[in-house]
Amino acid sequence: MSQSATMPQDTTQPDSNGHFGPYGGRYVPETLMHPLKELEEEYFRSQSDPDFQTELDYYLREFCGRPTPLYHAERLSKELGGAKIYLKREDLLHTGAHKINNSMGQILLAKRMGKKRIIAETGAGQHGVATATVAAMFGMECVIYMGAHDCERQALNVYRMKMLGAKVHPVTAGQQTLKEAVNEAMRDWVTNVRDTHYILGTAYGAHPYPLMVRNFQRVIGDEARRQILEKEDRLPTLLIACVGGGSNAIGLFFPFLEDNDVQMLGVEAGGEGIKPERHAARFQGGSLGVLQGTRSYILQDDNGQIQLTHSVSAGLDYAAVGPEHAWLKDNNRAEYSYAKDDQALDACLKLSRLEGIIPALESSHAIAAVIERAPKMSCDEIIIANLSGRGDKDVQQIADKVHL
């Protein structure tokens, strides 16, 4: 990607119907059109209400643990050579990942709308834990949908959700992963829309979710921008983040979009390689389609049937990508690559042993890209990688695959 790549300023925001160019929109049953419109209106009202922002800032600071550090990974930088590497430490947030930024914002919206019941989907379990956490904090009923396969590989997070009082429903349909969990959550919302708010966990789904989740997550990039200017008195050369639905990545990228010399790299799940049903790299093997409320790049066959996906990381194991990422790719404002399972596992161990930080397997995909890119860059260039979550939840799965 050229360092001079840019986008017209107005294209960094969706149109009134939630479209980023040809992507996004609102493709849902008629029964969900009213609650989505209600949510959109309440969200925009909240953005002009200083009391809402004051309350959100308070909980992000006092309960969640913001701001998170921008940490110079000195030993990793020295080991790799080349660029100076910083890690945005979202893993240090309460519950262990960036997900609570969005869950906190959305539950405050639910409270404003008078909703008493919260539902969510989860893959790796971090969004489920974050949602169960804020629901417990505000005394709301909470139901989490999670693929049965993901329940097995993320058993620790399942128990954490239950400890927090949430009801966890294993979904046994289909591949039993994140896509099926989203389907069940949407069915629940259609049935119980009067008293229920759906805290969707990523920058995907029907409008206003991609916009709203991005804006709740942009605190990551806003902080990182201020912090790097304080530390280095200049902006980074390259931002790197893993991309499943894409919330941690767009949260980091968005505040830098108009800084034309800042490059951006999103890293998808390459699984066992780019072959049908063995990866989740939508920009490598996907095509334009509609899934679960929005239009974007989707892994599908020639008949439009959604293909199976695979990733060692449950949070990246999804057949579609957020519409804003598709738009950034089309406009050459961000680049998208992939890391395979074995590369992510190697990166996880390297960061653990060099920096004393065990990253989530999702975040390890970003670290794998750092390992690949940093040595090719000069020593006066800077990388910021989003360490979106910690790896406690993945230790047993890693142990099953890597014998130490």
Image (cartoon, grey):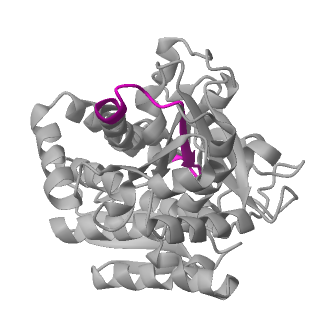
Question: Which picture quadrant has residue 127?
Answer: bottom left
Residue at left offset 30%, top offset 60%: 93
Residues rendered magenta in the picture: 229-246
Question: Which picture quadrant has residue 314?
Answer: bottom right
Give residue 289's position: percent from left, percent from top: 73, 41
Front-most of residues 366 and 135: 366
Give residue 8's position: percent from left, percent from top: 54, 11
Residue 175 located left or right of residue 350: right
Number of labels in the image equals 0
In the rendered view, tell whether residue 164 sits above or below residue 279.
below
Can residue 123 be seen from the camera position used here? no
Front-most of residues 93 and 42: 93
Front-most of residues 219 and 1: 1
Residue at left offset 40%, top offset 29%: 255
Residue 278 belongs to the span the image colors magenta: no
Q: In which quarter of the image is the C terminus?
A: bottom right
